[in-house]
Image (cartoon, grey):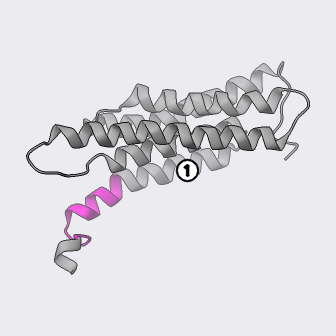
Amino acid sequence: MSSVFIDANNWGVLIGRLTLSLCAGGVIGWNRQLHNKAAGLRTYMLVSLGSALFVLVPLQIEPRSSEALSRAIQGIATGVGFLGAGEILHRSRQETSQPRVVGLTSAAAVWVAAALGIAAGCGLWQLSLVGAFFTLLVLSLVKRLEKTGLFNESENM
């Protein structure tokens, strides 16, 4: 765990971690923007950046404690859950003729963007890059597979 902690004056590492968080969130946001979702490029970049900033604070303060980092991560997961819930409620209310829950994928994508920001903030660049790649894979490739009807639950029951 000691390799995660950084010196507050190490500008290169700070800028690198924050840039990675922006890129990871941006990749997801770009995909969501292309599909005309309510939350787009800027939202995902800000969620990821904010998550990185929240974990960078306990990584720099003295005395260094993994408990403080753990609490920050727990707070991010909870707080971002509220953003996702707002996305679901907002999208569900637009279609008042039939009660439906929509926006679950967007809510999950916001949550993943926060996790990628956490990984980037902690300096886990490989995890952040692979996570962003897999997220894009799920949002793009799996969507195409769903459209083929192979995963339609009503037809398989």
Could you tell me residue 49's position as x and y percent? 57, 28
In the image, the segment drawn in magenta is 140-152
| Mark 1 Cα-neighbour bin, 10 Å: few <14, some 14–19, many ≥20 | some
The percent coordinates of residue 125 (x first, y second) are 67, 42
32 vs 61, left or right, is left
Q: Is residue 105 left or right of residue 2?
A: left
Residue visible at 41% across and 41% down in the picture:
84
In-front residue for pair 142/5: 5
Magenta stretch, main secondary structure, is: helix
Q: Is residue 13 above or below residue 84?
A: above
Residue 16, quarter of picture: top right
Could you say where residue 27 lies in the image, as x and y percent from the top left? 45, 38
| Image coords of residue 39 (percent x, y) | 35, 33
Amino acid on which the number 1 mark rests in the picture: Gly
Residue that mark 1 sits on: 131
Whether residue 144 appears in magenta in the rendering, the answer is yes
In the picture provided, is 45 more to the left or to the right than 3?
Answer: left
| Any part of residue 119 in sight | no
In this rendering, the answer to whether 120 lies above or below 153 is above
Quadrant the C terminus occupies: bottom left
Q: Identify which residue is drawn at 49% across, 54% down.
A: 134
Point 78% across, 38% down: residue: 68
Residue at the extreme bottom: 157
Q: Closest to the observer: 61 or 78?
A: 78
Looking at the picture, tell me which residue is in the foreground, 75 or 56: 75
